[in-house]
Amino acid sequence: MTLTKLSVGIITHSSVILADALHSLTDLFNNVIAFVAIRISQKPPDHSHPYGHQKFEYLAIFLLAVLLSVVSLELVIYAIEHHGNPVEQNITGLVLLILAIAVNFLLSRWQMGKAKFLRSELLAADAKHTLSDVLTSVAVLVGWQLAASGWYWLDTVFCLGVALLVAHLAWELFNQALPVLVDANANDKSLSVETLSRYTSDFNDIARVAEVRSRRMGEHINADLTLIVSPHLTVTQAHKLAHEFEDYLKKHIELNDVVIHIEPDELSDRS
């Protein structure tokens, strides 16, 4: 598909088609990176990666965002440098471009189905990218036909439009990857101190939840929390209580892992 668009762009001297070809070339790199990253992220935890390999998927998404940012900048430069150049019509190129759009649309539907089946955010992101390529190609087709009719300046406008679309996609991928890579708070209301404190009513020896930290690992959420418990519990009793509360939370909230820190209730001890 990329070679088809590249050939049509060279033949017709259309900046917007060449821009779309460069956009499609990034799709090719995306698919390779996505395939490798998904294979790695599905590996179980090991000695070198005791928390699993899920972040490799988000590292790949971050790399895709960087790649798209570079492509967007290159498209802006190319559009400005080739502003006003004549654009030619080509029937064969028109047919090939329409076929490329149809194939890419079918590919995006297949990728989205696979993403839902595998519950892979990276594959879902790649599917959205492919779909954006379809929409971009439709706009490219319209821009090319208008430019070939004598509206040469529209070729530059549509090329800049493609650059803006690519930049927007890069921004979305950055927002998807960075919170996971930097361990940002999961921002899940079910993991607030107030919400978790309600669950302690079934445990007489738990006074309250003092602190909660959470982060996302792909589809999963990991949490660290501090429980204030009765100071009269033995170490064994406190340990058992922590495990019971952990199991209780996992039944009510979708949590992958919970680390519980126990502290004695000093207020209760003084009383």
Image (cartoon, rainbow, N blue to C red):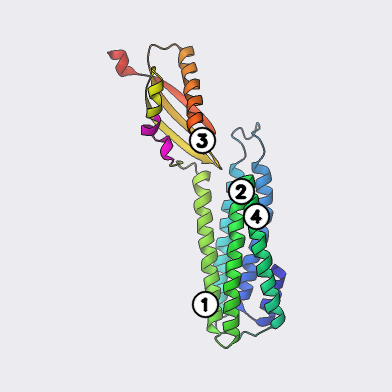
Tell me if I can see residue 30 in this picture.
no
Magenta residue span:
188-196
Residue under label 1: 157
**In the rendered image, which quarter is residue 63 located in?**
bottom right
Instruction: Judge depth for marks 1 and 2 and give the one in front.
Output: 2
Characterize the local packing of mark 2: few (<14), some (14-19) or many (20 or more) Cα atoms within 10 angstroms.
few
Q: Position of residue 144 (x, y in %)?
A: 60, 80
Q: Nearer the viewer, mark 4 or mark 1?
A: 4
Helix, strand, or loop for circle 3? loop
Q: Earlier in the sequence, mark 4 or mark 3?
A: 4
Answer with mark 4 or mark 1, whichever residue precedes in sequence: 4
Q: Quadrant of residue 136?
A: bottom right
The answer to whether 128 appears left or right of 94 in the picture is left
Q: Does the magenta stretch mainly form a helix, a strand or a loop?
A: helix
- The answer to which of marks 1 and 3 sits earlier in the sequence is 1
Q: Which mark is residue 116?
A: 2
Pick whichever of labels 2 and 3 is earlier in the sequence.
Answer: 2
Task: Assess disc 3: are there few (<14), some (14-19) or many (≥20) residues with their C-alpha within 10 Å of its C-alpha.
Answer: few
Q: As shown in the figure, which amino acid type bears the numbered disc 2?
A: Lys
Residue 195 magenta: yes
Residue 61, position as x, y percentages in the image = 58, 52
